[in-house]
Amino acid sequence: MTLIMNMADEDKMNNCDRVTGFRNIVVLTGSGISAESGLATFRDSGGLWAKYRIEDVATPEAFTRDPSLVQDFYNMRREELGKVAPNKAHYALAELEAELDGKVMVVTQNVDDLHERAGSKNLLHMHGELAKARCLSCGSVLSWRESINPHDRCTDCGLHDCLRPHIVWFGEIPLYLNEIDEALNEADLFISIGTSGSVYPAAGLVAAARALDIHTVEINMEPSDGQHFFHEGHYGPAGEMVPNFVNALLGR
């Protein structure tokens, strides 16, 4: 494991006590944690996203202009989701939540349901959820694992041709910003996993954590754009790095 530390006392580098004692942890996860389960990221070449322009499938204007194209794109992503499973990193975070003598809040930029399937309970999807649909008529958010089609009716208001993916598109405001702010204000440890640090407002959470004097940790394949904000960094596959760090947090 490659370990980069920004701590003054280098003797602490191999001392597990440096990561024990935290009782209120906020974890931010990005596409890197789900990539190891086989889900394509924005940056993957040859993947699903590489075949579409973001402005054609991931903006409110795109949905207004060509709703069928947008629905087809997310129907494909929903089908892809059914073919993958949580990996060791997802399970480690669920284990941390279950066993820590304190509180763990996972804030994810991902729209997949791999955290839930691994067992995480205290979870906020700031960019929405692929396995849900939102009614444009009554505003209801519905559990929805099948394709969304024009003839589908909202189970609350009964209207048809009114459902959209429950996804925060570019140009829309992310969800749960107040809840995330409250969680950070109570935290003593902030961990960022598998994110490039380039998409805001999620990318700004580490700076907010530093301003609150919270210890900050980055776990990633490589240093992110915001590497300088982290007290320490662990670089390598999430399926290896996250379980190792969780074990240290739990004093193993």
Image (cartoon, grey):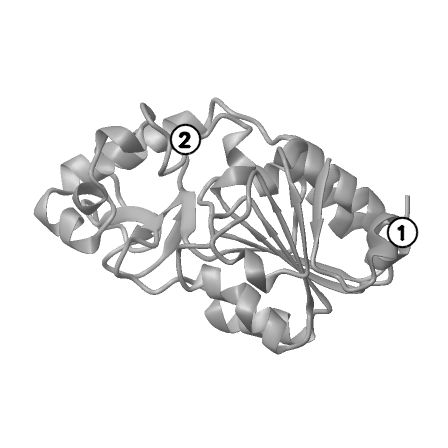
Q: Secondary structure at mark 1?
A: loop
- Tell me the quarter of the image containing the C terminus: top right
For label 1, the crowd category at 10 Å Cα-Cα, with few meaning under 14, some 14 to 19 and many 20 or more, is few
Q: Position of residue 147 (x, y in %)?
A: 31, 32
Residue 122: which quarter of the image?
bottom right
Q: What is the x, y in percent for residue 110? A: 47, 45
Q: Quick one: label 2, few (<14), some, or many (20+) residues within 10 Å?
A: many
Closest to the observer, 215 or 155: 215
Is residue 78 found left or right of 11 in the rendered image?
A: left
Q: Is residue 221 left or right of residue 24?
A: left
For residue 161, which numbered disc appears in the image?
none
How many angstroms separate mark 2 from mark 1 (CA)?
Answer: 36 Å
- Give, as a three-letter code, the residue at label 1: Asn
The N terminus lies in which quarter of the figure? top right
Query: Residue 120's spot in the image, x, y percent?
Result: 66, 46
Disc assigned to residue 15: 1
Q: Which residue is mark 2?
A: 40
